[in-house]
Amino acid sequence: MSSPAKPKFTRRPRSRSRRFFFFVLKIVVLVALLVTIVYGFRALRVDIKQVGQIPQRTLVYDVNGDLYSRLYGENRLLVPLEDVSPHFVDALLAREDNRFYHHFGFDPIGIARAIVRNLSGGGLRQGASTITQQLARNSFPLGGRNLDRKLLEAFVALRIEFTFSKRQILEHYINRIYYGSGYYGLEIASQAYFGKPSKDLTLGESALMAGLIRSPNRFSPLRNLTGALRERDTVLNRMVSVKKITSAQAAAARRAPIRVASSRKTVVQENYAMDAVDEELRVLLDQDQIDSGGMKIYTTLHPVLQKTAQAALDEQLVLIEKRSGYQHPKKAAFTGAEGEKTPYLQGSIVVIDNRSGGIAALVGGRDHGQSSYNRALLSRRQIGSTAKPFVYAAAFENGLFPESRVSDGPIEDGEVPEAPEWRPSNSDGGNRGILPARDGLTLSRNTMTVRVGNYAGEKKISQLASRSGLHEMPASPVSWLGAFEDTPRNLTAAYTVFPNRGERKQAYLIERIDDRFGLPIYRAAHIKTRAIDPGASWLTTLALRDTFTRGTASSARSQGFTQIAGGKTGTTNDFKDAWFVGFTSSLTCGVWVGLDKPTPIVSRGYGGTLALPIWIKVMKSAPPAEYPAVEFQPGVALKKVLLCSVSNAGATTACQRVGTAYTTDLPVTLIPKSICTVHSGSSLATAEEAREEEDRGPSLPNRVIDSILNIFRRR
């Protein structure tokens, strides 16, 4: 009996939908694999270490090592995570990435949630970028707002997660992102918006700062406080929903007042001193180094002197503008746009530390916002009588002495061989007869200075001035009275040779530069050279010191300036420029007053009345412990000598009879070897020595010999 036949089973063909599904799945896997290879390779090419190399502005420090200003790079101050308010960290994570500690760079759950919400909302309402992705986007140029950028961003974020800890990622993010109004990083934004460090941010302030991130310029509290408060409330609500805070805490934070700082505390000073630092920096470093930012520049600027100089200049010029008969436009009425020069009265100040050559203060005008033209560095003006000390120093080197007799009478035709028809007169129109040479400098007598210049020689004067720093002084008699141009910086620096005993120290602003890693890349060279014989410098300094007691700066005492100082006024033809350059043993300060377009300032606008009061205010503000004003030192040994005031040689007995002999302490480098030939007679010095020897009696060896001889004589 045959068994019943088994039923035949036939394989049912796969449905068309299943085949299509597996086909699509294969395509998706292949595409995913291709995307992983392509974007993974592109992500590998990124220098991931740059995430932690956050650019910040170059910091500029004053002479005390305190932060003075910033230059170049993004306006940012780095802060470690432990110095950030915990309120801000909670607000940031609640707003931007609540699953930060649970994903590996990009968040699939967050992406899916965003897709669902965007589809249900009928448009793009929620993004899905994690904090790590945002950090990648802010650290590297990954492209525009498209799928290519989003994919590359995700793979770079993945690399960031493998390279840095979560704590490091959070710290880099907080320091790198933009918070609006030109502020990068939380610390500088907190100081600018609330006047406090980020560690002191309250819950409400933290929520406001976190609310800025998605649209920082739009919701900056400086521009749109209402919008910023609305974003704060949104962040507070989000913090409640993710259980970072309670509803009661959120309500209290909403009620707490938000006090936005009235002034921006950014420590960025746009002034003439910073322009000068910038100018010097461009000489020292190449442009790539400058643009990279992150450096620390240590300058010689003194904050007290700098602040006082800026204020003193404007205060004095306002007083000049109020004078009766002042006919120029006034600064208070100026409505023009920012430009190079202005129609109103201007000035400049340079202060230099004699001991180093460091520039302690530099002011190039009254208002940097109205005119960025730096007159201290760029304005070349006639220097007037401030040129005279270099004429006298050259003459002292050539054998003239402070007590030498010089005529103050009118210059005769042909008296100056190089300019036979040149006959300058004194500013007061008078003449005072025969005077000691030093009076020609102390009292600023033009006719005496011309004769002293004749004695020194135009070539020697020009060379000495050049060694001192006045490189443009021509070898011409008219230059002896300052009929040539130079900048306030150069003139002030040249004057430092007098308190420095004839030594020129190169003026500079930048003491040291450290790179972003704290390694020094520049140190000031402190260059010094011999400009003037130390003896001649000493004699010139003594005459300039007398300027404050009986010369053109004697009014300083009545204005409260009592320190030991020397200096010289300067006034150019028709009162177009007013100068005063003076010094103590520690500081030299130069002041210029004038209009950008050379025009008479006021009637009888002398340097002693227009510029000297500014100089006094600045120098009185110098802290005495840092800048003591002690007695000037000669820098060379002094010896008492007998001289003739007519011949400038050693005095004779005949000089004594006619009254031209005098005794003085003279630098040994300048003592003449010859005796007077104008007045016949024997050397007065030899006669004096003989009398002194006679008064002293025989020398010790001679006394011993005489004693021995006397013993034998008695026998």
Image (cartoon, rainbow, N blue to C red):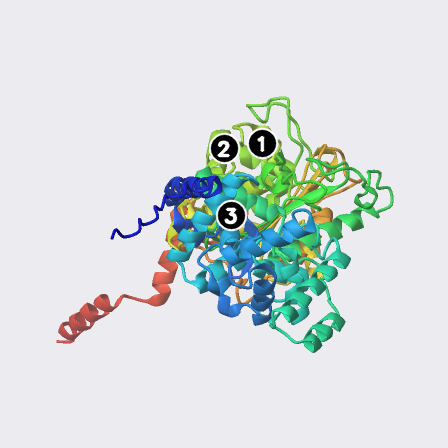
Which dot, 2 or 3, sits closer to the camera? 3
How far apart in space, not on screen, are marks 1 and 3 (Cα)? 64 Å
Front residue of 242/533: it is 242
Which amino acid type corresponds to the residue marked 1 in the rendered image? Ser
Q: Where is residue 501 in the image (x, y as percent from the top left)?
A: 45, 51
Mark 3 burial class by Cα count in 10 Å: few <14, some 14-19, many 20+: many
Mark 2 burial class by Cα count in 10 Å: few <14, some 14-19, many 20+: many
On the image, numbered disc 1 is attached to which residue?
479
Q: Which of marks 2 and 1 is nearer the N terminus?
A: 2
On the image, numbered disc 3 is attached to which residue?
137
Quick check: 146 left or right of 445? Answer: left
Q: Where is residue 610 in the image (x, y as percent from the top left)?
A: 73, 47
- The image quarter in which residue 649 lies: top left
Q: Is residue 294 above or below residue 646?
A: below
At horizontal 47% and vertical 51% (from top left) the residue drawn is: 294
Which amino acid type corresponds to the residue marked 2 in the rendered image? Ser
Q: Where is residue 436 in the image (x, y as percent from the top left)?
A: 58, 46
On the image, numbered disc 2 is attached to which residue?
462
SS at circle 2: helix
Q: Are marks 1 and 3 in contact (CB under 8 Å)?
A: no
> Looking at the figure, which quarter contains the C terminus?
bottom left
Quick check: 335 left or right of 437? Answer: right
